């Protein structure tokens, strides 16, 4: 079946599936370690409360059958174990139908988590991981050569990711069109990485080159994925390099990693990897399953394509509850000034101008001036990311900020595990407040002399001092 299979892409499939399984493992690990404070029965946005008002058809999930924190933990940790097994190659050691079942189970378990994750799971990379995982089901395993139609579906997904991001930029902030957005972006992005300070201090002409290269990589190069070889491989290599550049410059969870893994399926030869083993023709049922999958992708692509062509393009949207074919985009607008919410507590029972307030430290978001940003991606710190959005507008935090304050006033262990440092390790604070600061990267001179990565200026109050007594007078 020369028209159906493409054995020359066996190595690309191997890299994609093994790498994607690693990302799934990290996604399930983040779910297992963070859910109790965010989504658990006593969490900030409890899943049982969400399930009570949301029908199954809107958010398909195993948790509609029953919910308990123990059941959620079981699903998350089962996902970790299954993903690790697939990353180690178990899917290539079992029959084709079993390999497909393993990928389908990974997808279904994570879909169950995403569809009850509410605002904590509202990012485009959740849909991207689900769409890529569903696609991986139909790529087969070592018993068959990669189906050519599914490989083209992977390229179509890369095209939508890149083109969606490119178009939203060109239609959005003017700084993308005049090539100045990176004067600000490395400093104001949601969660800077360890190299972001250095990227920010690159010469401005180089920042303009970065933006121009980004436009090239997102608006033009992806179409080369559908050209004959070796053009498709060159286009894929360019996309991989640009995604690695983004990995180095910031923390964007697994968005860049899944995109570059998808691009590897368009490269036809990897000299450092073994060649494809001899395989038999695929069974007829597999051919039928692949054709059904491709037909589904074609039908479900209509709305994403309309969105891409629309002047009111939506950014990161799912048009079906299974997240099978989605639309993507990022940073249609760029903030020029970084604002950060700093949480502070005090054990004083009476507040005076001389009251001593002590700061909480988060794992990823900027806080202490001497704290060097760390590399977290492809792992995702959900609370840290939402704190960045809350600083942009309190409306982003309306549902969960006061529940967060209540849990910090209780020294809730699950909530404290989401933080780097709690200044009240023995007894909880009596009052907690939030202040809004403007943050800027330090200059090279300030870093050298004062060993500070950030400078900050107080803007004002985000939340007034709150105690349990004051919180009980207002609804959560």
Image (tube, rainbow, N blue to C red):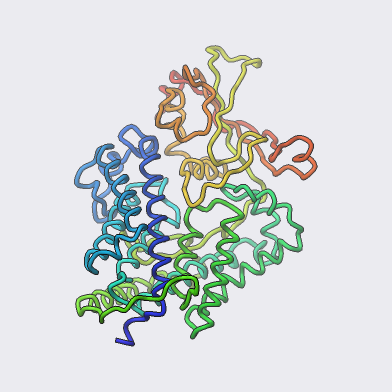
Residue 151, percent across and down?
A: 39, 75
- Which residue is at the front of the view, 26 or 315? 26
What is the quadrant of residue 20 in the picture? bottom left
What is the quadrant of residue 23 in the picture? bottom left
What is the quadrant of residue 204 in the picture? bottom right
- Which residue is at the front of the view, 282 or 460? 282
For the point 42% across and 51% down, the residue is 122
Q: Residue furthest top?
A: 350
For the point 63% across and 37% down, the residue is 371
Residue 309, percent across and down?
A: 49, 73
Q: Considering only vertical position in the picture, is 473 above or below 438?
A: above
For the point 77% across and 40% down, the residue is 448
Residue 299, percent across and down?
A: 32, 75
For the point 46% across and 44% down, the residue is 382
Residue 368, percent across and down?
A: 63, 33
Is residue 144 visible in the rendered structure shown here?
yes
Q: Quadrant of the N terminus?
A: bottom left
């Amino acid at each position: 079946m020369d028209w159906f299979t493409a054995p020359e892409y066996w190595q690309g499939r191997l890299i994609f599936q093994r790498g994607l399984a690693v990302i799934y493992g990290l996604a399930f690990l983040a779910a297992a370690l963070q859910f109790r404070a965010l989504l658990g029965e006593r969490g900030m946005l409890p899943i049982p409360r969400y399930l009570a008002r949301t029908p199954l058809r809107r958010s398909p999930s195993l948790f509609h059958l029953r919910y308990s924190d123990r059941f959620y933990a079981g699903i998350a940790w089962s996902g970790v174990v299954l993903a690790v097994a697939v990353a180690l190659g178990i899917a290539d050691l079992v029959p084709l139908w079993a390999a497909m079942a393993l990928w389908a189970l990974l997808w279904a378990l994570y879909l169950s988590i995403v569809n009850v994750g509410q605002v904590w799971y509202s990012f485009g990379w959740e849909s991207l991981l689900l769409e890529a995982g569903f696609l991986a089901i139909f790529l087969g395993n070592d018993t068959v050569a990669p189906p050519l139609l599914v490989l083209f579906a992977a390229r179509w997904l890369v095209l939508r990711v890149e083109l969606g991001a490119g178009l939203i930029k060109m239609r959005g902030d003017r700084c993308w069109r005049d090539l100045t957005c990176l004067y600000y972006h490395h400093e104001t992005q949601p969660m800077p990485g360890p190299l972001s300070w250095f990227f920010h201090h690159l010469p401005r002409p180089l920042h303009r080159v970065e933006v121009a290269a980004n436009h090239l990589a997102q608006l033009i190069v992806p179409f080369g994925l559908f050209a004959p070889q070796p053009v498709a491989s060159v286009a894929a290599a360019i996309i991989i390099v640009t995604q690695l550049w983004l990995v180095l410059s910031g923390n964007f969870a697994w968005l860049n990693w899944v995109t570059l893994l998808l691009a590897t399926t368009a490269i036809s030869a990897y000299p450092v990897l073994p060649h494809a083993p001899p395989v038999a023709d695929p069974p007829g049922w597999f051919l039928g399953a692949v054709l059904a999958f491709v037909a589904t992708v074609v039908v479900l692509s209509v709305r994403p394509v309309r969105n891409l062509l629309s002047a009111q393009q939506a950014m990161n949207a799912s048009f079906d509850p299974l997240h099978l074919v989605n639309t993507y985009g990022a940073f249609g607008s760029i903030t020029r000034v970084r604002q950060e919410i700093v949480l502070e507590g005090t054990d004083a029972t009476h507040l005076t101008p001389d009251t001593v307030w002590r700061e909480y430290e988060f794992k990823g978001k900027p806080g202490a001036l001497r704290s060097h940003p760390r590399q977290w991606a492809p792992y995702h710190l959900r609370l840290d990311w939402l704190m960045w959005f809350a600083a942009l507008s309190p409306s982003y935090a309306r549902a969960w900020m006061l529940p967060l304050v209540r849990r910090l006033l209780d020294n809730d262990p699950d909530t404290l595990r989401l933080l780097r440092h709690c200044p009240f390790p023995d007894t909880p604070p009596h009052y907690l407040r939030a202040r809004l600061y403007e943050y800027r990267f330090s200059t090279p001179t300030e870093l050298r002399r004062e060993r500070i990565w950030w400078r900050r200026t107080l803007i004002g109050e985000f939340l007034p001092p709150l105690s349990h007594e004051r919180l009980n007078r207002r609804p959560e």
